[in-house]
Image (cartoon, helix red, strand yellow):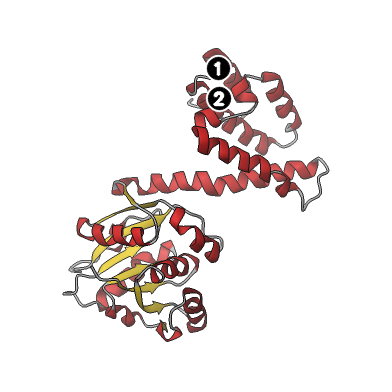
């Protein structure tokens, strides 16, 4: 199984993954970007020779494994270009890193390339931090069966394990990741805004919540979501919820979000066996009465 690979798209994701692969025995033969200067800078971060930096897709022909880390809306077009210039007899494996798109988005008629998608379940806001955490990430993938060994070996080199999902489930998988990571940040920002309205200094509002958030993650890690849930809903504390709704009365959109999440939280608390069904029903009724949203109706 060849470890000679080319990176197409040396942004945060591609650079972090390529550095990890390079440090674990894989040999980059080309780092291909749209502009030469940032591509050379990416080579410096990766640790490979800057002479590998190029804007020419034809350089990918020297590799047996192609790692495509371009924006989602460019995957199909760039994959098409790669397959048009590739040697059809090489049996090259082409892997993209998108969480939402299936490997088949790269499919081209009469191409002999083996296609796979591999997505590290990890945020990439900072490439160095992401590189340092790649070994902690699960890797979710799907694609051509014949490409699976190469994809699994790549994930193992990154310190993880490839988990396969059905192709049709890619968008649902990515929605789960978006809920867990992206919307978590949005909720934190909304909570910080509420703290600022209480008179907390602007720069302190977010950091004040970090111990609470870390402890919550620790609870979920140790106990799971059902037993890790805390707060007024799992306690059945309708009085506290009523006070929250009153406090949010002048912010109807935020109150609506609070109610929507509260209904789901009540169902989770009931499912955990810690909130009686009649209490859950009362909480959901209160929240629905204060929201434009009606859960399950």
Q: Position of residue 193 (x, y in %)?
A: 73, 45
Q: Position of residue 70 (x, y in %)?
A: 42, 67
Q: Nearer the viewer, mark 2 or mark 1?
A: 2
Tell me where residue 90 appears, x and y as whole percent: 19, 74
Q: Is residue 292 visible?
A: no
Q: Residue lying furthest front in this view?
A: 24
Q: Is residue 284 above or below residue 29?
A: above
Q: Mark 1 — residue?
A: 281
Residue drawn at (79%, 42%) of the image: 197
Q: Residues within 10 Å of mark 2 (few under 14, many from 20)?
A: many
Residue at 54% from the left image edge and 49% from the top image edge: 182
Q: Quadrant of the N terminus?
A: bottom left
Residue closer to the observer: 193 or 2:
2
* Residue receiving disc 2: 266
Q: Is tag 2's residue or tag 1's residue first in the polypeptide sequence?
A: 2
Is 253 displayed left or right of 155 in the figure? right
Residue 192 vs 226, above or below: the answer is below
Where is residue 96 drawn, in percent x and y?
35, 63
Q: Which residue in the rendered view is the most extreme toward the bottom?
A: 51
SS at mark 2 in the image: helix
Cα–Cα gap, marks 2 and 1: 8 Å
């Amino acid at each position: 199984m060849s470890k000679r690979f080319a990176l197409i798209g040396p942004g945060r994701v591609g650079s972090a993954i390529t550095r990890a692969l390079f440090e674990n025995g894989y040999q980059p033969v080309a780092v291909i970007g749209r502009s030469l200067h940032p591509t050379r800078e990416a080579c410096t971060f990766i640790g490979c020779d800057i002479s590998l930096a190029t804007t020419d897709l034809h350089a990918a022909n020297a590799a047996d494994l192609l790692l495509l880390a371009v924006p989602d809306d460019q995957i199909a077009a760039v994959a098409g270009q790669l397959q048009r210039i590739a040697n059809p007899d090489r049996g090259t494996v082409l892997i993209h890193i998108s969480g939402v798109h299936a490997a088949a988005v790269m499919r081209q008629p009469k191409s002999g390339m083996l296609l796979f998608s591999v997505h590290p379940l990890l945020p990439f806001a900072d490439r160095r931090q992401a590189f340092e955490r790649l070994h902690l990430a699960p890797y979710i993938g799907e694609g051509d069966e014949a490409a699976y060994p190469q994809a699994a070996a790549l994930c193992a080199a990154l310190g993880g394990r490839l988990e396969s999902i059905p192709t049709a489930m890619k968008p649902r998988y990515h929605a789960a990741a978006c809920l867990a990571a992206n919307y978590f940040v949005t909720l934190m920002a909304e909570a910080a805004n509420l703290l600022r309205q209480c008179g907390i200094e602007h720069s302190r509002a977010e950091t004040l919540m970090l111990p609470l958030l870390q402890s919550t993650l620790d609870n979920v890690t140790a106990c799971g979501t059902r037993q890790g849930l805390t707060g007024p809903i799992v306690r059945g504390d309708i009085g506290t919820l009523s006070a929250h709704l009153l406090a949010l009365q002048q912010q109807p959109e935020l109150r609506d979000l609070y109610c929507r999440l509260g209904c789901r939280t009540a169902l989770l608390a009931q499912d955990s066996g810690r909130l009686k069904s009649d209490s859950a029903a009362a909480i959901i009724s209160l929240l629905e009465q204060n929201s434009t949203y009606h859960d399950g109706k």
